[in-house]
Image: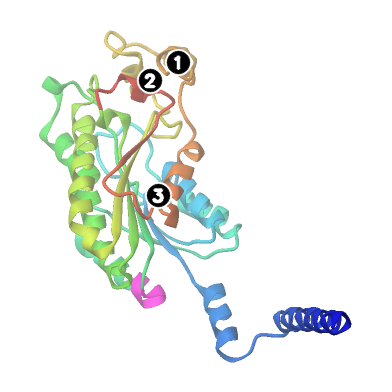
Amino acid sequence: MENSEKKNSRRDFMKTIGWASAAIATSSLPLKGSALNRQKKVQTIQKIAVISGAARGIGRATAVELAQKGMHIWGIDILGKVSDYTQYDPADENDMLETKKQVEAMGVKFNFSKADVRDLSRLKEVAQEIKSQYHNIDCVVAVAGIQTFSKILDSQTQDWRDTLDVNVIGVAHTIIAFTPLMMPKKKGKIVIISSTQGMRGMWSGAAYAASKWALIGLAKSSAMELGEYHINVNVVVPGLIYTKMTKNLKRFQVAMGPGYENKLVTEEQVKERLKTRDILGVPWLKAEEVSPVIAFLCSDDANKITGAVYDVAAGTSTIYTS
């Protein structure tokens, strides 16, 4: 009886080993039929990001960041003068070609369209171009914006119109034009770039501050309406970013504050002033320090985040009331 039990036990053990060996052997066999098709489908899924203001600054940094994560990029930029009231050189086609070079170095595709975000019909044309090539998109990052400076009593109507048309209406146009490319999938991400000036007042920059405050309301309202399509809308609030938009005398004067509007101010002076202002002791941030947060909000890890505001401001956020 005892010998019989040992034989049965040994037989069961060998049967278990046999099944395990078969499973291992099967897992190493080439995939066939539907299993192979499923694997191919996973490998060929393309994620597409549309980025306005992609020629340089935060737009370029975001394009490269998303490209590193395997997303194909479609950049949009006016590539020319936007307003008579800006004090810096606008982006041009050479800037966009540099973005293209950096993105394609990541092994993904990069297309770009010259477009003014104030022109909704043009943005819709671009949307159709994208649809003809990719059918759908996965995220939209609205970066395009301008910055002008003047005291409120010296400001001109056209200055206000230029700033609000680009920074607010242009973002609304971007949402209107490209959201339909995400709706069929019942999934998508929209990230709007505001500013710390959209969370507080700004000396000699009322139009700019007003435009950036408006984006918070635009994002939260859009998030409420687009939730039924599982499209998330969030805001990133960068601190002062070291780009051509901020590297000019007028911006340096504004950074120094009242009393400096007619003085020659050096970059080194501004650097020392700003280092004492921010909690982390940095004068300004690099665009590449903001783009990882944007990329997070474009990812599946942010599927349950919408209507939110993310500050990347080296501690400037500590002076806000909310």
Outermost residue to the right: 3
Mark 3 and mark 2: Cα distance apart in space: 31 Å
Residue bounds of the magenta highlight: 129-135
Picture residue at 21% right of the left edge, 39% below the top:
163
Pointer 3 residue: 297
**Considering the numbered disc 1 on the image, is that residue within a helix, a strand or a loop?**
loop
Q: Main secondary structure of the magenta part?
A: helix
| Label pair 3/2, CB-CB below 8 angstroms | no
The quadrant of the picture occupied by the C terminus is top left
Asked if residue 22 lies left or right of residue 173, the reply is right
Counting every numbered tag in the picture gives 3
Residue 187, percent from left and from top: 33, 64
Depicted 284 relative to depicted 54: above or below: above
Viewer can see residue 176: no
Viewer-nearest of discs 3 and 2: 3
Above or below, 42 relative to 7: above
Residue 36 spot, x, y in % from top left: 60, 85
Residue 252's label in the rendered image is 2
Structural crowding at the residue carrying mark 3, measured as other residues with C-alpha within 10 Å and reported as few (<14), some (14–19) or many (≥20): many
Q: Amino acid at mark 1?
A: Thr
Residue type at mark 3 is Leu
Could you tell me the amino acid type at mark 2?
Phe
Please tell me how crowded label 1 is: few (under 14), some (14-19), or many (20+) other residues with Cα within 10 Å: few
Viewer-nearest residue: 5 or 24: 5
- Spatial CA distance of label 1 from label 3 is 36 Å
Horizontal side of 95 relative to 24 (left or right) equals left
Q: Nearer the viewer, mark 1 or mark 3?
A: 3
- Asked if the residue under mark 2 is in contact with the one under mark 1, i.e. CB atoms within 8 Å, the reply is yes
Residue at image coords 54%, 81%: 38
Q: Is residue 229 visible?
A: yes
Report which residue position mark 1 lands on: 266
Quarter of the image containing the N terminus?
bottom right
